[in-house]
Amino acid sequence: MKELIRHILREELLNESSFFLRRVNLDEVKELLPINAEQVFYETDSYEQFKYELTLRAVETIMWNDYELGWEDLPEQEEIEFVKRASNVLEKTIKKLYNIQNRR
């Protein structure tokens, strides 16, 4: 599964830098999503915003914990594109988390 996800992202990002692909394991992102789901749900106004912000928080957590790089140290446009694509790959998981929060 991990290799399939990486393969999909690599193909989508062919003409872009692999800065995040080399550093962020999507399995780790997936593991972090539930930790932040409740807080992000109450901070956002729509599913699309929830999906993006939840993934962003997980990616930035990994970048800080593994490399001590804060958001201000990261290539902004690449981060935006990576987070959008990663959130699309992890859509089923994110949708489940959103629905759980929406029912509370």
Image (cartoon, rainbow, N blue to C red):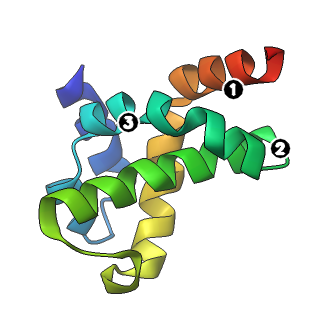
**As displayed, is residue 93 above or below residue 28?**
above
**As displayed, is residue 95 above or below residue 70?**
above
Which mark is drawn over residue 98? 1
Quarter the C terminus occupies: top right
Mark 3: amino acid: Leu
Which mark is drawn over residue 32? 3
Whichever of labels 1 and 2 marks the residue nearer the N terminus, that label is 2
Whichever of labels 2 and 3 marks the residue nearer the N terminus, that label is 3
Whichever of labels 1 and 3 marks the residue nearer the N terminus, that label is 3
Q: Nearer the viewer, mark 2 or mark 3?
A: 3
Residue displayed at 49% across by 47% down: 55
Mark 1: amino acid: Tyr
Residue 66 in the image: state x and y as whole percent.
14, 58
Residue displayed at 52% across by 42% down: 87
Left or right of 60, for residue 43: right
Label 1, secondary structure: give it. Answer: helix
Contact between marks 1 and 3 (CB within 8 A): the answer is no
40 vs 16, nearest the viewer: 40
Label 3, secondary structure: give it. Answer: helix
